[in-house]
Image (spheres, grey):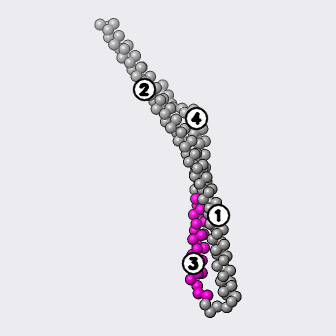
Amino acid sequence: MAKKFNFKLDTVLRLRSDKTEEAKTELQLIIRKRIEKEQLIEEQLFKLENHNLTRSEHKKLEEIQAFYYHKEYINQEIKRLKMELDNLLDIESLKRIKYNEALKEEKVLQNLKDKKKIEFIAEIERKEQIELDEIAIRQYTNKLTNV
C-alpha cells in the first residue's frame, strides 16, 4: 500500500512557474532591445567621430552647410536614441523587479512543497516502523505462548 505524494497546491505552483517564465521572457526581450539600442548609439557615435575627422577645408559653402546640418542631425539622433535607451533601462528595471518577485513567489511554493514532501516521507517511515514493531511484538508473543 504505497502512497503517492500529492501536493495540493501543485496547480498553483505550475501557474507561478509559468508566470516566472513569462516574466523571464519579457525581461530577455527588453534586454535584447536595450542592447540593440546601445549598438545603434555606438554606430551613430562612430559616424559622428568619422564626420569630425573629415576636413572641411577647400569646400564650397553649400558642402560646409550640408556637412554642418548632417553633423547636427547625427547629434540629434544620438540624443533621441539615448532618451529611448533611458526609457528602455527604466522598463528593464521594472521587468527585472517583476521577474524577481515571480521567482520569489515560485520559490516559496517550491520550498513549501519540499517541506510537505519531507513530512510525508517522515510520516510514511513512522507508520512503517509502527507496523514493523507490531509484527515483532506479535512474533515475540507467539514465541512466548508456544513455549
Rendering coords of residue 92 (x, y %): 60, 56
**Which amino acid type is shown beneath numbered disc 1?**
Glu
**Which amino acid type is shown beneath numbered disc 2?**
Glu
Q: Which secondary structure, mark 3?
A: helix
**Classed neighbour count for the residue bearing mark 4: other residues with Cα under 10 Å, few (<14), some (14–19), many (≥20):** few
Q: CA distance from mark 3 to mark 4?
A: 59 Å
Q: Which residue position holds label 4?
A: 9
Label at residue 125: 2
Q: Main secondary structure of the magenta part?
A: helix
Q: Which secondary structure, mark 4?
A: loop
Rendering coords of residue 147 (x, y %): 29, 7
Rendering coords of residue 111 (x, y %): 50, 38
Q: CA distance from mark 2 to mark 3?
A: 74 Å
Which residue is the extreme one toward the right?
62
Q: CA distance from mark 1 to mark 3?
A: 21 Å
Q: Nearer the viewer, residue 146 or 125?
A: 125
- Specify which label sits upstream in the sequence, 4 or 1: 4
Q: Nearer the viewer, residue 111 or 52?
A: 52
Q: Residue at x 64, y 79 (%)?
A: 71
Q: Which residue position holds label 1?
A: 84
Q: Which residues are magenta?
A: 31-56
Q: Can residue 25 be seen by looking at this rendering?
A: no
- Specify which label sits upstream in the sequence, 2 or 4: 4
* Front disc: 4 or 1: 1
Q: Which secondary structure, mark 1?
A: helix
Label at residue 49: 3
* Front disc: 1 or 2: 1
Q: Quadrant of residue 51?
A: bottom right
Q: CA distance from mark 1 to mark 2?
A: 60 Å
